Amino acid sequence: MTELIWLIVGQLLTVGGALAAVRALTEVLPPGVYGMLGLGMTAATLLQQLWFGPLCATTDRFYSPAREAGQLGVFFRMLMRLVARTGTPVILVSTGVAISLAIGGHADWAIIFLSACGFAIASGANNLLDSVQNASRCRHLVALHAGASAWLRLALALLLVWLCGASASIVLIGYVVGSVFVLASQYVSSRRLLQQTSCVATDRKPCRSAIPGRPDVDDGLSARKGRPTVASEVDPASVWFDRMWSYLWPSLLWGAFTWAFAASDRWSLQSFATIEDVGRYLVLYQLGYYPLSLLAGLVLQWVYPIVFAQAGDGTEPDRCRQAMQTSRRWLALMVIAVAAAVLVTLLGHRLVFQFFVSSSYRDVSQWLPGMMLASGLFALGQLATLPLVATAGSQAIARCKIGSSCLGMLLNAAGAWWGGVAGVVAAQVGFSATYAAWIMILLQIQSRRLRHDGSGNDSQSARKLAA
């Protein structure tokens, strides 16, 4: 119960900071500048999708098996290798883009792009440490850092706007500085946490094999405890790296597509409407999409350590079925929350905009229920992916991610051309409905496979890696 309270506290602080940011920034930034901020943030989203997002998902998935096997030290070393492997090309390409913008006479956009990249790196590193702390069940650290990040970014952005003037790059620089302060605190607390978990890992007998699927590999504790060791030519680090990379690379593939979809709504409006419409749409997106996204994030933070611990390394059918049952219960609760949120915004969208948004943005309030519905459907799809990746691996949802993102890009472009802001909201609903339905079908197929075959795809991949 204490952990749940801390998660709720963290989400309340984050939601409060996000809503305060909408209110404060719409007061000091006109719709055109706010639209430029939204376009600049697409660069931050790109780095998140192609770098830190997959790393966080991999941390979530393999922390519990690594701790269960007594191999946390190897796990963290392989995680740092993955950080370097995925980050090097991203940084090189981003540097090239910034130089190209500057040489091409778009110095203002180059500054916005670099500021957004800096924010993405600082906030992404924070998210990665959050994943470690949350997987370690240190919910209070996650909650306090999430709340501090939201409010500190806003405070520094407003301070810099007051000192230097209203511009998208100034706001992003404030975000960068705030994220760096929080990252320093994250680093200190994470070092202490890793030292504690390392001591625990080396002082206890692992519950399972040090390497999932390799019971013949020495766990590193046999000699210390007087047990005979089993010789093996297999390097534990290479096996862990192979498993983690196998899980991570599909999300790198679909990350490019999901980013293109996530950016296509704003850039479509920029192409077929006006920069002011981009600003109004961004406010609509923040008020309609963020609340249920944050609620889904709260549920996922609470559930995924439980589900992944239940599923283990994905090789035992009984544990996989237990993870499925847990996820279904949370899905049912999420459906109720989505229905309630849509009903509230349908009845009170004008009141919401009057309270949270400057008057120059209020002419799009009638589309808030549609955006809330789109957010809710997407949140249901995201929650449904949890038992899939826990029991079947990340490859199980790759086609869905790529296919639905491509459809979403087409819908966004068509919606912006046809109806401006209203058309893009309709496109978001269409995309989210398609994504949620596709994931639910995959979930049903995996449930049947577990019932009839007694194993999931991840167990097969684990055995292949073990061979």
Image: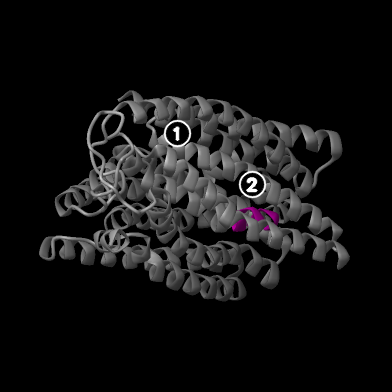
The answer to whether residue 300 is left or right of residue 175 is left
The answer to whether residue 217 is left or right of residue 429 is left
Where is residue 66 shown, x and y percent of the image?
35, 42
Which residue is identified by label 1?
A: 133
- Is 43 colored magenta in this rendering? yes
Amino acid type of disc 1?
Answer: Gln
Which residue shows up at 61% across the image and 34% down it? 183
Where is residue 158 shown, x and y percent of the image?
74, 35
Q: Camera-side residue: 218 or 404? A: 218
- Specify the label residue 157 is tagged with: none
Secondary structure character of the magenta stretch overall: helix
Q: Image quadrant of residue 109?
A: bottom right
Query: Spatial distance from mark 1 to mark 2, Cα to Cα?
Result: 18 Å
Number of marks: 2
Q: Image quadrant of residue 415?
A: bottom right
Which residue is identified by label 2?
A: 121
Which residue shows up at 75% across the image and 58% down it? 95
The residue stretch that appears in magenta: 39-47
Task: Indicate the colouring scheme.
Answer: one colour
301 is higher (above) or lower (below) than 198: below
Helix, strand or loop under label 1: helix
- Is 13 colored magenta in this rendering? no
Marked residue nearer the N-terminal end (1 or 2): 2
